[in-house]
Amino acid sequence: MAHESRPLTLGLDDPGPGTGAEPGFVIRTDGAARGNPGPASLGAALIRLDRPDAHDPRAQPDATISDYLGIRTNNVAEYTGVLRAVRLAAELGARRVELLLDSNLIVEQLHGRWRVKDAKLAPLHAEARRLLAGFDRWSAAHVRRAENFAADAMCNEAIERALAGGPASVVRRPEAR
């Protein structure tokens, strides 16, 4: 299978705000499972690429997802987070996405450098690649866990919220400009 990820050099090819750049998001996602498998969740933070702080781990997200998934493995939760976030970005009109993930496994698999050996992950990987192909450009890069604290916090929030009887899913979309 040919690999065409249309990789980006993060930050260097971004024309910046106000230049008519294609709409897009920096997407930070995380998945969590308490036990493996165990109660699992995902968190995602989407930050508009036209913002000067788009790549700052402390940037306030423009959109977020916090979902409780039930009993899943950590890797299934991680992939599900990518899928949910990429779908939301497409729904919001993005033509470009930059995934910043603390799962090196997913980054390497999305770029085709590592094989998908786990049968549970194969359909999730295939769906992620299909969704990403719908963007004009996409990239996926590994970041340290410490840089992914917003998505991690949303994972923990989802598990606590669901176990306390709250809604399984909370999605916050950008306010109309």
Image (cartoon, rainbow, N blue to C red):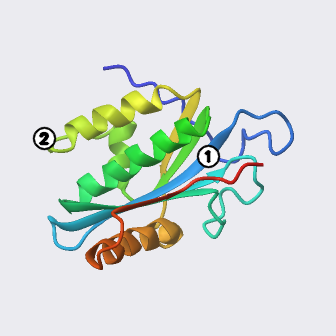
Residue drawn at point x = 38 percent, y = 44 percent: 83
Q: Whole-percent x and y of residue 36? A: 15, 67
Question: Image quarter for residue 154?
Answer: bottom left
Q: Whole-percent x and y of residue 58? A: 63, 70
Which secondary structure, mark 1?
strand
**Residue that mark 2 sits on:** 119
**Residue that mark 1 sits on:** 25
Q: Whole-percent x and y of residue 39? A: 21, 69
Q: Amino acid at mark 1?
A: Phe
Image position of 1 with respect to 145: above or below: above
Question: Image quarter for residue 38?
Answer: bottom left
Question: Image quarter for residue 155?
Answer: bottom left
Q: Earlier in the sequence, mark 1 or mark 2?
A: 1
Q: Nearer the viewer, mark 1 or mark 2?
A: 1
Residue drawn at point x = 49 percent, y = 73 percent: 146
Closest to the observer: 173 or 89?
173
Q: Is residue 27 left or right of residue 153?
A: right
